Amino acid sequence: MTIAIIQFGGSNCDLDVLHVLKDVVGVDAELVWYKEHDLDRFEGAVIPGGFSYGDYLRAGAIASRTPIMDSVKKMADEGKPVMGICNGFQILTESGLLNGALATNMYPKFRCEGTYLRVETTDSPFTSAFKEGEVIRIPIAHMEGNFYADEQTLSNMEDEKLVAFRYVDKDGNVADEVNPNGSQENIAGILSGKRNVMGLMPHPERASESILGSDDGVRMFQSMVEYINNR
């Protein structure tokens, strides 16, 4: 098993994800530059955080139109797991692999802090190692993490349990004051209709070892690996 970590000009969390996959989870992972076209040899992919193309135009807009994203779409169509973290989430929405859009934070400044998330579903390749309703702690680092979707899309997401994580307080309560960016319904992460693509704004790779203050994030990568092993 080898997982691809897609690199764009401006990616800056790629080595963190590589460390977690190889040294913490213990699987093969490889950094893949965006000019590569063929991802057939990989069993899954992570699009890491950063500032691809300097967030020019819109965050993720240019990266979503690079040829490698056609290969990422092919992976998703084949049922392989694809995780987009922060800028990776933005790239996934811009490319149409996930619904909705990510706009500038309601209070327009960069937010870098710990957040509590509530696990909304365990029925996905990325959340199977959690318990539904469990509260975990994962940090954010973004300026454009304000998730938006129209009412019908939000309703469908709720009906199909495609919301993976919500921002909550430490007791698991949804509240405006713990929403760091103004995301609708306090949404922090979502799934595709086939459930094998996930985007989230918080950074699980920054919460994958206890020395960092939380190791809750490592279970997302472990879930992904378990899904691949069981395919």
Image (cartoon, helix red, strand yellow):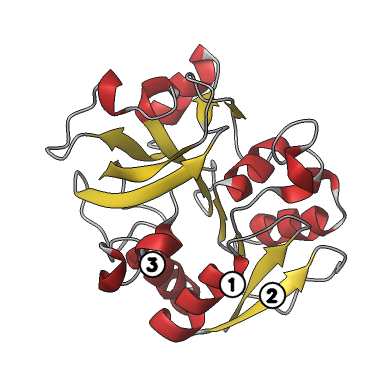
Vertically, is 29 above or below 196? Answer: below
Question: Which of the two marks, 2 or 1, is nearer to us in this view?
Answer: 1
Residue 123 position, x and y percent, is: 35, 52
For the residue labelled by badge 3, is the local secondary structure a helix, a strand or a loop? helix
Mark 2 → mark 1, Cα distance in angstroms? 8 Å
User: Which residue is disc 2 drawn over?
Assistant: 31
- Residue extending farthest to the left is 171
Question: Which of the two marks, 2 or 3, is nearer to us in this view?
Answer: 2
Tell me the kind of residue under disc 3: Ser
Residue 4 position, x and y percent, is: 65, 72
Q: Earlier in the sequence, mark 2 or mark 1?
A: 1
Residue 66 position, x and y percent, is: 85, 51
- Residue extending farthest to the top is 151
Q: Residue 91 is drawn in which quadrant?
A: top right
Visible in this render: residue 26? no
Q: Which disc, if any, is residue 223?
A: 3
Q: Residue at x 68, y 58 (%)?
A: 11
For the residue labelled by badge 1, is the local secondary structure a helix, a strand or a loop? helix
Residue 6 position, x and y percent, is: 70, 64
Q: Residues within 10 Å of mark 3 (few under 14, many from 20)?
A: some
Q: Which disc, if any, is residue 15?
A: 1
